[in-house]
Image (cartoon, rainbow, N blue to C red):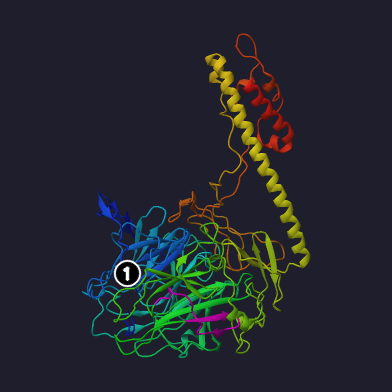
Amino acid sequence: MVHQVRDASAAKDEGELERPSFKLVRFSWVRGHGKVAGAGLIRRTDSPTAACTRFSHQTAFLNGTLYLYGGQVKATGTQSTDTWKNNLLALDLTNGWDVGHPLLSGLPQPDGPPAVANGYIWNDYDNLFLYGGEFADNPYVEPAAVSIWKYAVASGAWTEYLAPLTSSGNNSDGGGQPVQRSAEGAGISVPELGRSWYFGGHLDLATTPGWSDQVARVYLKSLLEFTHPGYINDGVYSLGTSKGAPESGVYRNITQGGLQGEEVFTERADGALVFIPGWGDLGVLIGLAGGTATEFTDDLSTLDVYDIASSVWYHQKTTGNAPSVRVNPCAVVAAAPDASSFQIFLFGGQNLQPKKQQTQYSDMYILTIPSFTWVGPIMQDGSDMPSPRAGHTCNLRDGQMIVVGGYIGQTTDCDSSPAYVFNASSLKWTSSFKPLSPEADLNSENSVLAASYGYMVPEEVVRVIGGSPGGGATASTPAAGPATNGPFATGKSPVFTVTASGTTATITASGSSEAVPAPSPSANIGRSHHSSEALTAAGVVAGCAGVAAAYLGYCAWLYRRQVRAYKSHLAVVNRYNSPVTASRGSLGGFAAIFGRRAKNKSHIGSHVSPNPQGRGEKHGWGHSRHESASSGSEPLAWAGRDSMNSPTMGTSRESTVGERHAPVVVGIGGHQDDVRDRPRNSESGGSTSSAERLLDGQELSFFNVVMGPRRALRVVNGLQEAELN
């Protein structure tokens, strides 16, 4: 289904690169400020998955599934026309697969969203948002009016938001300006903050309707921020810390953030943008590589760092052997198990000139943060290493980098595999993807830590930053010298407390730490000043909790046996009782009370808690998001996940998107229509058995099993004995 909504929230560079189902036919009528599509039912096919080569596409990782949209797709190596597509595919990352046969499935072919390349897919916990991209040139397609397309994962419905406008805010334009469609920029989403960004790119006749072919391409250095529906953002004047973004989201075009207005901060396209948590109140973005039609942005020895909380850009020098200048690489971030360091993996790309004869790369470099030291080119091992490429995508899952597609030049007809897998710990290309996470990362509280599950710091990096593969890095400041401005100018790293499967470790600025296992996908990181006594107390509490869990598990097993035995006993009794008696011999008053899944039917409405850090809370529209912090501790820059009841795609587990799965105790109350509730006499045709006398004065409930397990066991044995007799 496709909806069209008018947004009321106001205020190719030279190096570019069948299953049957149903669809809903569009016809529109006017409703309010926009148009909503109606539908008729006809047969529909899914997006094709086969491709000789695929490049310049868009990807987003959400709840165990990697979504791929659009880009250029060639069926044969010689195909030169009709390569722009609007296919929507899903790659399952909750199950294992071989690189030659990834679990790639075609979703229903979109009807409405355009066929674009070099745009970006933003995502939150429930939706994908298609922004930007350029239209086809083989043959040429006139760009459509600027709009944003939302894909609801649960329903599979597409919604179009027409003519979006910017809103005024910190270091941004004055608001009320049309959002432009940029292409070949760098994008990133941080769902725990409820924000996404698109950095740089260009405008030309392939992106903008009405653009003359006599007007040169315009390169950008602006940063477009998107606040997702329902989230607050104190950098946007109309939202602040008390109002959530509307259904169409809110856009802020940041053009005056620190160095952004100076000549040293240049326009660029075809770069990469990554998110590093923990530095500054909300974390930082780091821009790498890119360039214009004639020159590269920089030599990667000085990088652009954006402080999310203050909306200010800074420069940061690096040390080590930096990669050569390039465009169209891909980059991912992996966190050490104790979060004492973060590694940026930069793979591939190409040079700029000569036009259509660029050289693609297959080298790999690692930039370790906060040392800002380049390590590489690293020695890549494995027989499944991809060929040199550019315009590919890479996403991290379970410490493994999944590379999809890429432009492989003119000398190779088809790509050897649809996807490739790189083990970020062993630095080897592997023949298969092996899932490690125990679940599908439903609404992970920190996207970087969730993706780093199972990751260990490579020895090549440990030799530079100290510590061990498990963490404990001793390098806590930029190796090129203390930063003069920005979040890295403090002279020491923040103090983290990482909780993973009941184990807590405190990492200080000196790099000392307790060894911890790899954090779970839902690992919760926060700043803390807890002492070692707190760690001991936490261990004791964890041990007690384990004992309690084991005891409750035994009681649950015993309770289920008790219920089954009593049902069986009632069946025997009812066969000899009158119809009236039998009709009352039900267990309708009993409810399953152990192992039920929380449904969160009553979220906190529009309550707003003070949030000086501006963390990613949802208020007003949509579901509410709230946080809690212990007294005296400073909350970090991300909020806990909200519980939303929508299905998960790409997983066989019985779960819903955003739903926390936790036991919930449901009290049993009210009248219980049970044969044992009535006095027995000759008229009723019933008689009291020895087994039933075991229950006299004792409610058949889980609570009573917990309080008296020995009695419950006697009841079970007695009921079974009576049945045998």
Task: Name the residue at the front extreme.
Answer: 383
Question: Which region is colored magenta?
Answer: 364-386
Q: Main secondary structure of the magenta part?
A: loop
Compare residues 561 and 345 and report the one nearer the observer.
Answer: 561
Q: Is residue 646 above or below residue 281?
A: above
Looking at the rendered structure, the number of numbered marks drawn on it comes to: 1
Q: Is residue 648 magenta?
A: no
Give the x, y percent position of residue 355. Answer: 30, 87
The amino acid sitting under disc 1 is Val
Quadrant location of the N terminus? bottom left
Give the SS element for disc 1.
Answer: loop
Compare residues 225 and 650 and report the one nearer the observer.
Answer: 650
Circle 1 residue: 146
Q: Is residue 373 magenta?
A: yes
Name the quadrant containing residue 325: bottom left
Give the x, y percent position of residue 410. Answer: 29, 81
> Which residue lies at the image location 41% right of the left edge and 56% below the top edge?
153
Q: Is residue 411 visible?
A: yes
Give the x, y percent position of residue 694. Answer: 71, 24
Give the x, y percent position of residue 187. Answer: 43, 73
Quadrant location of the C terminus? top right
Question: Residue 257 vs residue 547: left or right?
Answer: left
Q: Is residue 324 above or below residue 689?
A: below
Name the quadrant containing residue 185: bottom left
